[in-house]
Image: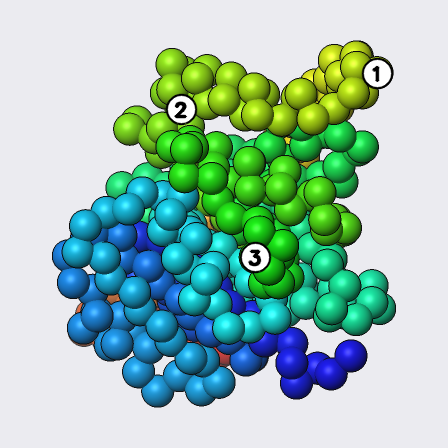
Amino acid sequence: MNNELAAVSIIIRTKDRPELLEQAVRSVLDQSFRPLELVVVNDGGSDIEPLVQEWLAQQANLSFNLIQHTQSVGRAQAANVGLQAATSPFSIFLDDDDYFDTDHIAQLMQARLAIGQSFEQLVAVHCQARAVHIDADGTEHLLSITGHKLAENQLYYQNSLPILTVLLPTAVRESGIWFDTQFNLFEDWDFWLQVSQICELHFVDYASCAYRIHDAGSGVRDEARQHLAFKQVYAKWLNKLDEDSRFALIANSHQWHEEYVARIQTQNRAELDRIGAMHSHALATIQAKDGDIEHLNNLLTNAQQRYEVLERSRGLLYWLKTSRPSAFACQCKRYVCRKLFARKH
């Protein structure tokens, strides 16, 4: 294998979300891996060329292809346009409201190289992704971690491949694999089912990217649309399995659901442990600060007491200095001087 050919095309679909798009693009620019090709498909939104050109200024080993549609062609066809435009041996998709960690592409490519097969072999590598909610102030909250090694036919049960987690050979398009434009939802699930028919899928156990879960307005979270989309996927794909495989799929679905619940419980325990450790550290810090405050209070009290003694001594010295000389006064002066001399030494 020739590492010089190991370029990656990153395909982003977008429409009128420049603030989110900027975060996605900057996560591409921050990638430790090079060379890269960035393909942005603006599906009927306002002109973004000046913005993207500004973001991409002075980027090395990164080529850029901006495709702008005057009218929207839909999510599935926009993805096809981006895949058709990709010129690298490998491609990966990134939605405009999601982002990559700095080493995302590098780790996927490292995993692909470790498999040892030539780039002509149709092998896809996938990892995990963090599902996050981001507040209006920019604070990110981890909801779950998605992605795992797939059992046989498990992809027919549900989509466990977030679109930004899969590094696939661009050559799948030569086998007629494209996004089905009949799908308005779960078009990526249908696409991965197609890919799984001709590609080996290798899982690497780490999360190096994040996708947003929105409060409202997301099609995936609309139960009615989701129900219809499930029906559409199952109607297309379940009849491709023989009867025994369909029965096995139904039987295994219970185990897969239990495994999913177990993963969520493990993640929740880990998060609770993390929060507990932070709480314990905060309590220890507060206790340490309380100890510091008590020590400073003691020092202040001692200083005040010494100041009061010095003030009384200064007053007595002034009285002795200004009072009429007498045997008693002289005796007092000698006594005070001895005490002050002893205090200094």
Q: Nearer the viewer, residue 68 or 96?
A: 68
Residue 31: % across, % down: 52, 71
Q: Is residue 288 visible?
A: no
Q: How crowded is mark 1: few (under 14 residues within 10 Å), some or many (20 or more)?
A: few
**Between marks 3 and 1, how big is the CA–CA gap?**
31 Å
Image point 28% across, 28% down: which residue?
A: 217
Q: Name the residue under label 2.
A: 221
Q: Against 213, is 315 above or below?
A: below
Q: What residue type is disc 3 on?
A: Arg
Q: Mark 3 points at which residue?
A: 173
**Between marks 1 and 2, how big is the CA–CA gap?**
32 Å
**Do the residues under discs 3 and 2 have CB atoms within 8 angstroms?**
no
Q: Name the residue under label 1.
A: 244
The colouring scheme, among rainbow, by chain, secondary structure or one colour, is rainbow
Of labels 3 and 2, earlier in sequence is 3
Residue 71: % across, % down: 19, 50
Q: Nearer the viewer, residue 339 or 325?
A: 339
Q: What residue type is disc 2 on?
A: Arg
Residue 7: % across, % down: 59, 76
Image point 40% across, 83% down: which residue?
A: 59
Of labels 1 and 2, earlier in sequence is 2
How many numbered dots are placed on residues in this image? 3
